[in-house]
Amino acid sequence: MHPRFLLSILTTLVVVAVAKPVRPSTSHVVHEKRHNVRNLWQKFRRVPSRNTLPVRIGLTQQNLHRGEDYLHAVSHPESAEYGQHWHPSKVIETFAPTQESVDVVTKWLVDEGMNPNRIKLSRGRNWLDFNATVGELEKLLKTKYFMFRHSRHGQHHLACDEYHVPDHLVEHIDIITPTVHFDQHIGHERLNNRVSMDSGVSDELKKRSLANGERRPSTGIQGSGLDGWSPKQGDYVVNAMMTLDDCDKMLTIDCIRALYKIPKGDLSAKNNSWGSSTFLQSDLDVFFDQFEPKLKGKGPDVDLIDNAVVQTQNQSFQFNGESALDLQYAMGLVFPQQAKVFQVGDLVRGASFGNLLDAIDGSFCDANADNAVDSIDNNYPDDIRCGGHTATNVISTSYGYNEADLTARYEQRQCAEYMKLALQGVSMIFSSGDSGVAGNGHLCRDPTSGAFNDGSQGLFTPAFPSTCPYITSVGATQIVPGKTVKDAETACEETILSGGGFSNVFAMPDYQSKAVAAYFKDSAPPYTDQQFNNSRTVRGYPDVSVNGARYVTAVNGNFSLSFGTSASAPVFAAMLNLVNEKRFAAGKAAVGFVNPVLYAHPEVMNDITNGTNAGCGTKGFSAVKGWDPITGLGTPNFEAMEKLFLSLP
Ligand SMILES: *[C@@H]1O[C@H](CO)[C@@H](O)[C@H](O)[C@H]1NC(C)=O
Ligand SMILES: *[C@@H]1O[C@H](CO)[C@@H](O)[C@H](O)[C@H]1NC(C)=O
Ligand SMILES: *[C@@H]1O[C@H](CO)[C@@H](O)[C@H](O)[C@H]1NC(C)=O
Ligand SMILES: *[C@@H]1O[C@H](CO)[C@@H](O)[C@H](O)[C@H]1NC(C)=O
Ligand SMILES: *[C@@H]1O[C@H](CO)[C@@H](O)[C@H](O)[C@H]1NC(C)=O
Ligand SMILES: CC(=O)N[C@H]1CO[C@H](CO)[C@@H](O)[C@@H]1O
């Protein structure tokens, strides 16, 4: 008999008759529960029980508790294995769930009446996939499905309030989707704040523009990111011919080069495109014509994921501000290196980070690698994209969630994927958010009920994925009005406030424990656990910061000013891209996960010691000497940072 045939018979037998005796699944427990006061989403009807849903069960993976140690080995500057990133197959083997997990969960489904042929196991053994009717799923998970409508954007989302699994399966199941997670991107609330061009923006005006930002209603825009996360638009710029003396008023590529000592790029290694996951549109020519004539006519490579589209129809800052900002600056800085955009999401439904992970990380994927489906909405069965896109060495993302929007299990599952990408040498860069210690849209939470409130008091709202310890979170700084690129910057407090704080979900990683302990010892903030998780045992963010104010950006044929950590993240990513070029030229590996190196060598950063990130009725945290939860370790001194990374093996 052919061995492969034998194997497939064995697999079938395992499903039909699991070797181990399993306790009867009589008692069920709540596995995950929706934030019961997430009042932005309103329930409006039951879902018909005959509707079919693509269901994924994320099985518990092995060895995740060792992830931090594995990552330390390849990314800590003193480790003998520095730079020896893992092959994807080693990642899959190391973390794959046990056969027991596969078997017991499959047996549960079969016992509940499901034909084994309907159940597919992913290549990494970490997902069980099947299609089920809402009726079947409600019975299986002892729950009810509803459609929810977003109170501001009108978008729909399918979810349940909580779901159950048999108690003996709790240890074998991370998450089941779709259930309680509100992970889809919803329409941007991009702001058209008019910010005075006078260098000293008055407090009154600042307050007014932030307040407008909170309240301005906005229509739903599909597939273009998250609430309150996008860059904020300032004044139009009439004459963009500025000199380095004007960087406090209008920031250009030359200002950034001068601030951080970044030389012009001259290398372009194969497979070292600067990468970003975003929503592309451009006024690239208008911008490059003015600032980087060499790039005129150039655009990024675009990887369309799940039938994503490049929309050119709607020309406005709302639609195009984000990608214009990302691309104009990053492409300018890394030229002649090419840029690549992972365009995720289509006009039918917005995408989640899960969709990006499906595309670039086969081990995260939702079906057999050879037969993967569009994981957003099954609208495009021809798009075989499971792990089918090659991740760039550095990927910058200017979107995020409030940690409280999602469940801890969901975030831990996704964060584990960032750890796997980091092991493979991918630098994942995220912006830290623009609302200071408050969340997207300036939301804070009631300490008792956990409900989001109007932002005037209550618990600070940390951002995810910034709180995941395996990514690099980038906050924002600005030039002090009236000062120059030669002077120390301050935390950005104009139009936006640098996002920062402490996780409620993720423990403090080793690489930052010294820096965070020093922060609490020398500069303990005057708050209690009624404001933030002051256990001193949790992950603090951001890790670094980069200027996020007054970027001259071409949008729809005109220049205007942009503000936000969504400017800071792509610029930091561009710097890593340039460092990688030099490391490749020297026959070395990509920098991969940079946090352990940077925390071990804070001397390559410009420490930022001025400014706060107000929110929730407080003045927020303060930038202080050393690491702080507003500017992290500070801004890069590119020359020193590059030299450091080139000195490593
Ligand atoms: C679910 O249904 C879709 C659409 O019919 C199909 O393409 C997909 O392969 C099915 N998934 C599974 C796991 O059977
Ligand atoms: C452009 O905007 C309109 C109105 O908001 C929307 O209906 C349409 O889908 C958008 N088109 C694209 C390609 O984004
Ligand atoms: C603070 O963080 C710890 C560790 O993750 C967690 O157990 C605790 O619930 C958090 N506190 C709050 C108030 O969320
Ligand atoms: C661009 O600026 C010009 C001059 O200020 C103005 O007339 C025009 O309406 C602007 N275009 C857009 C699309 O805002
Ligand atoms: C700190 O920032 C504030 C606000 O931008 C500014 O007025 C002040 O001059 C800064 N101080 C220093 C020492 O940079
Ligand atoms: C590992 C990797 O990314 N390899 C790619 C390098 O670029 C060539 C084309 O330029 C691709 O074919 C490889 O897959």
Image (cartoon, grey):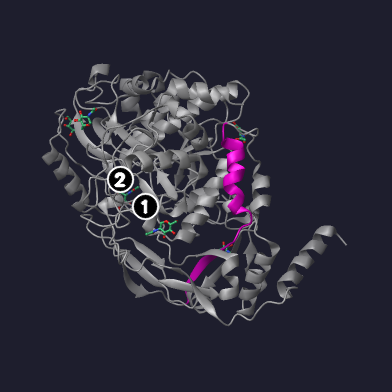
Rate crowding at label 2 as few (under 14), some (14 to 19) or many (20 or more) other CA atoms within 10 Å: few
Place of residue 572 in the rendered image (x, y in percent of width and height, measured from the top left):
42, 32
**What amino acid is labelled 2 in the image?**
Pro
Taking the image as shown, residue 199 lies to the left or right of residue 57, namely left
Q: Is residue 397 above or below residue 147?
A: above
Residue wearing tag 2: 525
Compared to residue 525, the image places residue 25 above or below, namely below
Magenta span includes 475: no
Percent across and percent down for residue 336 are 47, 22
Local crowd size for mark 1, using a 10 Å CA cut-off: few (<14), some (14–19), many (≥20) = some
Bounds of the magenta segment: 50-77
User: In front: 78, or 59?
Assistant: 78
Secondary structure at numbered mark 2: loop
Contact between marks 2 and 1 (CB within 8 A): the answer is yes
Report the side of 318 relative to 64 (left or right): left
Tell me if I can see residue 130 in this picture.
yes
Residue 534 badge: 1
